[in-house]
Image: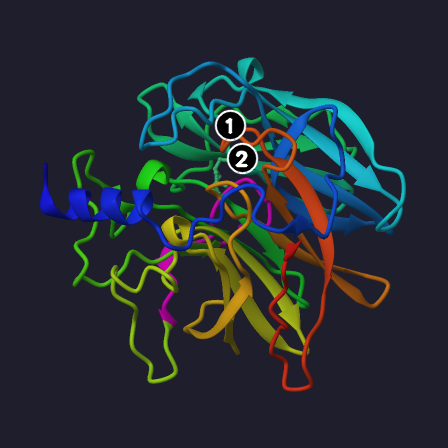
Amino acid sequence: MQKNILWLLCSAMSSPFLLAQNQGTPLNQPLVSHIYTADPSAHVFKGRIYIYPSHDIESNTPEDDEGGHFDMKDYRILSMKKIGGKVTDHGVALDIKDVPWAGRQMWAPDAAFKDGVYYLYFPVKDKEDVFRIGVAKSTSPTGPFKAEAQPVAGTYSIDPSVFKDDDGQYYMYFGGIWGGQLQRWDNNQYTAKAALKKPNETAVLPRMAKLSADMKSLAEAPREIKIVDKNGNLFLESDNDKRFFEAAWLHKYQGKYYLSYSTGDTHNLCYAISNNPYGPFTYQGILLKPVWGWTNHHSIVEQKGKWYLFYHDVQLSGKTHLRNVKVMELKYNADGSIQTVEAYRN
Ligand code: FUB
């Protein structure tokens, strides 16, 4: 076994960060319990909160280090008028069998609204088992969505998140390492057998690109997003309690761009700030500590002057791949830093 893979496996299996279920008492309850949902991308469209989650299922696909057991086959959208209000499940919005180019594994989606049309962006493996990002359209925020015949040209890996800036420009942030395959993409070129980074190598960086006016294509080639420490240095792979792993989310607060993301094998949600949507982003700290389960994935949204963190854990099932979405309020300090939140009470 290659040394770097051994290191990653060991760090994952013996992770001192992994929070076992039943450590503490959940401070928030699942938003729905009749289906499993994860990776909640929340947006306020016309005053209502819509959540675009992954729809977790028990497919009995064996668990592997590439996340094969996350074998989701459709998307279902949730909505609510306000936090704490009734949550509506709007049923299947897009099925994998209606995506002509898709092979398997519908992972974390996001959505955007422009000129009367809602766009669902979703990562799924193509028929060669390479993750690509697709787009589907609807005139309703809850679908049904009609997928384009091909993935968005130039996209790859997982976890698209689409941010609209104040000037009306949309940007897509994306990528995830390990099963998300981002380590296979260097300079936007694919190498199927690319190795994971070694501990002393610079960590893989998330990607972003401006979206074209048609919302179905990239206006430019994807670029790496630099996440640096307070001295301007990029993180190494061994800085795995801080470096990017997956689940990039971009929001703006008081004129600054906040990039938040999961550190994956150390299970933190962290954030970094920039004056520019392209970065570089300076690391600030932990937003949410590990939750029950292996993955930690979120979104941040404002409604009526309050900010909310949507996240997930495995409270309902106790199984890594059967998650449930939750929400809690997020607060900022006067200097713009975010107060670290806890999902459990001890
Ligand atoms: O839901 C499948 C994958 O798990 C997501 O794409 C990752 O972010 C992780 O939450």
Q: Position of residue 39 (x, y in %)?
A: 58, 41
Element under disc 1 = loop
**Residue 205 location, quadrant:** bottom left
Q: Residue at x 67, y 73 (%)?
A: 253
Q: Residue at x 64, y 78 (%)?
A: 255
Residue matched to label 1: 106
Looking at numbered disc 2 in the image, what kind of residue is underneath it? Phe
User: In the rendered image, which quarter contains the N terminus?
Assistant: top left
The span shown in magenta is 210-227
Question: What residue is at 54 percent from the left and 13 percent from the top?
Answer: 97
Q: Quadrant of the C terminus?
A: bottom right
Instruction: Tell me which amino acid carries mark 1.
Output: Met
Report helix, strand or loop for mark 2.
Answer: strand
Closer to us: mark 2 or mark 1? Answer: 1
Asked whether, in this view, residue 130 is left or right of residue 45, the answer is left
From the viewer's perspective, is residue 6 above or below residue 322? Answer: below
The image shows residue 310 at horizontal and vertical percentages of: 67, 50
**In the displayed structure image, the side of residue 268 where residue 57 appears, left or right:** right
Q: Which residue is mark 2?
A: 122
Q: Are marks 2 and 1 in contact (CB under 8 Å)?
A: yes
